[in-house]
């Protein structure tokens, strides 16, 4: 056996309405003052109401931070840290998507640390402890509730990551009622984002292992079987629960077998054009798969029927072709846009995007085929 290490969130609580139990869970751990991180859209939609009521019913005080922005800027993260310190928080909770959850992770660390955030970017640079941390996702996509990663936007557009096991929360709460009613394009984009996590974990050049492989395969099976139902019947709790579970399993996989070029090429789109992360991944995904094909064809052939069972009848080469084609058409068939040009990206922007993608060395080292500037530029051109 090749030696490997696997780490994940120690507790998962899943089921409709489970966010209402967060307060009691924290009270049992001796918590008294909760800092709740979310965003205005999530709170305005009432998705934090059950958690807030449960926290109050448990006799705990709560300070609410709802000023999180997508792809959280560094200064906004630091403002949240300052607010948590001022509130005297002794635990952090997040109900939201990837950006609130990533912000909450950093708040939990920095609220009890004197180290500057700038010193934590990279892998394994977090030292010391953190406040108790509970995360409840409102989309089935990022898997942030089970990953040791927080992504921050620095400067004008560059994204940097803090990666450390210290960021793994104590508890992940999977409550499908938080995801019902999401528009089909959002459900599709976040679902494909979760698929990307599983696909890239399964083909990661570094730290891929038998446990991450099992999780990635099961994630793809569940996501492939439920994404259309979740989009077409947004209140179907079973489909929503399957999507949440698939997203979490993919998160556990890529937390241990890191993602690669799809994410590296998606990040500049978010930084420069404010494209939602899931959509960015979906738009470059088929083109990165085509580029990686010569290095990962065996793995792609194995996972293709998990997402699209009809591909099982084909030979391995046709399975891979089918996987690329089906993933290219999946998003548009569920209401997503299909080209970068629809987002205002033009040919003159592509060199800048390719240059920025090549800065994502933390991700590119995991790609099964070496990525070059010329290849990144060609992928953006194909996606335009």
Image: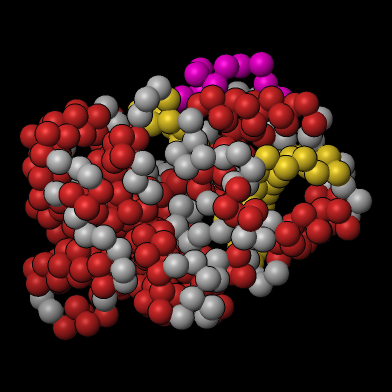
Left or right of residue 27, residue 135 in this image: left
Q: Residue at x 41, y 74 (%)?
A: 231
Q: Position of residue 67 (x, y in %)?
A: 60, 39
Please check the rendered image and state whether residue 295 is part of the magenta-colored stretch, yes or no.
Answer: no
Q: Residue at x 83, y 47 (%)?
A: 29
The one nearer the camera, 70 or 102, is: 70
Left or right of residue 340, residue 37 in this image: right
Coloring applied to the structure: secondary structure
Question: Which image quadrant for residue 13?
Answer: bottom right
Residue span colored magenta: 111-124
Q: Position of residue 314 (x, y in %)?
A: 12, 79
Q: Residue at x 29, y 31 (%)?
A: 360
Q: Position of residue 163 (x, y in %)?
A: 48, 33
Q: Main secondary structure of the magenta part?
A: loop
Left or right of residue 132, residue 99 in this image: left
Note whether 167 is above or below 246 in the view shown.
above
Note whether 246 is above or below 166 in the view shown.
below
């Amino acid at each position: 056996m090749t030696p490997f290490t696997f780490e994940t969130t120690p507790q998962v609580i899943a089921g409709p309405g489970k966010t209402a139990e967060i307060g009691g869970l924290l009270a049992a751990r001796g918590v008294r003052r909760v800092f709740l991180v979310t965003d205005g859209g999530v709170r305005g939609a009432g998705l934090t109401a059950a958690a807030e009521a449960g926290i109050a019913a448990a006799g705990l005080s709560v300070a609410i931070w709802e000023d999180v922005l997508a792809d959280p800027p560094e200064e906004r993260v630091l403002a949240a840290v300052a607010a948590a310190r001022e509130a005297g928080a002794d635990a952090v909770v997040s109900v939201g998507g990837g950006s609130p959850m990533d912000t909450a992770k950093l708040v939990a660390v920095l609220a009890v640390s004197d180290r500057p955030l700038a010193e934590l970017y990279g892998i394994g640079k977090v030292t010391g402890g953190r406040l108790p941390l509970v995360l409840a996702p409102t989309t089935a996509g990022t898997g942030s509730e089970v990953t040791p990663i927080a992504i921050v936007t620095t400067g004008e557009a560059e994204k940097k990551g803090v990666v450390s096991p210290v960021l793994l929360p104590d508890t992940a709460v999977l409550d499908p009622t938080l995801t019902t009613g999401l528009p089909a394009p959002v459900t599709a984009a976040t679902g494909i984002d979760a698929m990307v996590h599983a696909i890239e974990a399964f083909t990661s050049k570094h730290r891929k292992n038998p446990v991450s492989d099992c999780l990635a395969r099961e994630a793809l099976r569940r996501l492939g079987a439920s994404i259309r139902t979740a989009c077409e019947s947004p209140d179907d709790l079973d489909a929503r629960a399957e999507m949440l579970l698939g997203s979490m399993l993919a998160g556990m996989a890529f937390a241990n077998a890191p993602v690669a070029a799809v994410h590296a090429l998606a990040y500049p789109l978010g930084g420069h054009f404010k494209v939602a992360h899931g959509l960015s991944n979906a738009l470059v995904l088929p083109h990165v798969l085509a580029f990686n094909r010569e290095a990962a064809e065996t793995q792609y052939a194995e996972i293709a029927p998990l997402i699209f069972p009809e591909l099982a009848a084909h030979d391995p080469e046709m399975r891979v072709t089918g996987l690329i084609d089906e993933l290219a058409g999946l998003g548009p068939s569920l209401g997503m846009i299909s080209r970068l040009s629809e987002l205002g990206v033009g040919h003159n922007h592509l060199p800048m995007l390719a240059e920025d993608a090549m800065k994502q060395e933390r991700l590119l080292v995991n790609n099964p085929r070496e990525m070059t500037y010329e290849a990144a530029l060609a992928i953006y051109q194909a996606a335009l």
